[in-house]
Amino acid sequence: MSSEGLQNVTFSPEDEAMIVSTRIRVGRNLDGYPLGPGVSKEQRLEIMNHVVTAAGQFDEDLKGNFYPLEGMNKKVQQQLIDDHFLFKEGDRFLQACNLNRDWPSGRGIFHNEAKTFLIWVNEEDQLRIISMQKGAGISEVFDRLCRAAR
């Protein structure tokens, strides 16, 4: 994956002024693990540990912190809520398909220091990978996503 060759990423100043933010997100599931409704508590913890290990290798603008939901500091939790980053238990559709089992064990959120790159772990998908920023920077947002996925 590469941002090279993206088409229609440049906007006129008038069009760019209308764009508040740009977000690209993908949902992924890891090879060798069942989809969310079939994942055991132990498998969910393994998935989370894979993400912690991988995210620990990020550097430069991708470098950040992982926050497990289980035992999360209340101040950190409130900041993630205020930033509109925190996913929560209680969605009736996730409950209906048994995705809220063992809440909050094996779930967490990674974000880089600039809060322009996030990974949700074991919410609906095993991984929800999100790259975003203010403005119309589609190339920058996609480039960040591509670099993280390598």
Image: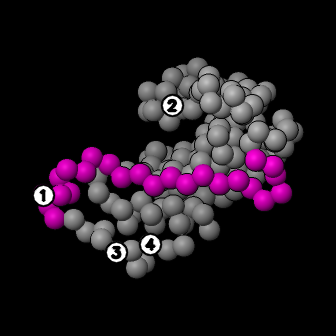
In reply to whether residue 103 is colored magenta, the answer given is: no
Residue 100, position as x, y percentages in the image:
71, 29
- Residue beneath disc 1: 14
Residue closer to the observer: 98 or 103? 98
Q: Circle 2 sits on which residue? A: 80
Q: Which one is in front in this view, the residue at disc 3 or the one at disc 4?
A: 3
Quarter of the image holding residue 74? top right
Please tell me how crowded label 2 is: few (under 14), some (14-19), or many (20+) other residues with Cα within 10 Å: some
Residue 102 appears left or right of 69: right
Please, what secondary structure does the residue beneath circle 1 have?
helix
Is 14 displayed left or right of 31 in the figure?
A: left
Considering the numbered disc 4 on the image, is that residue within a helix, a strand or a loop?
loop
Label 3, on which residue? 7
> From mark 3 to mark 4, how far is it between C-alphas?
9 Å
Magenta residues, as a range?
12-35
The colour scheme used here is one colour
What type is the residue that disc 4 sits on? Ser
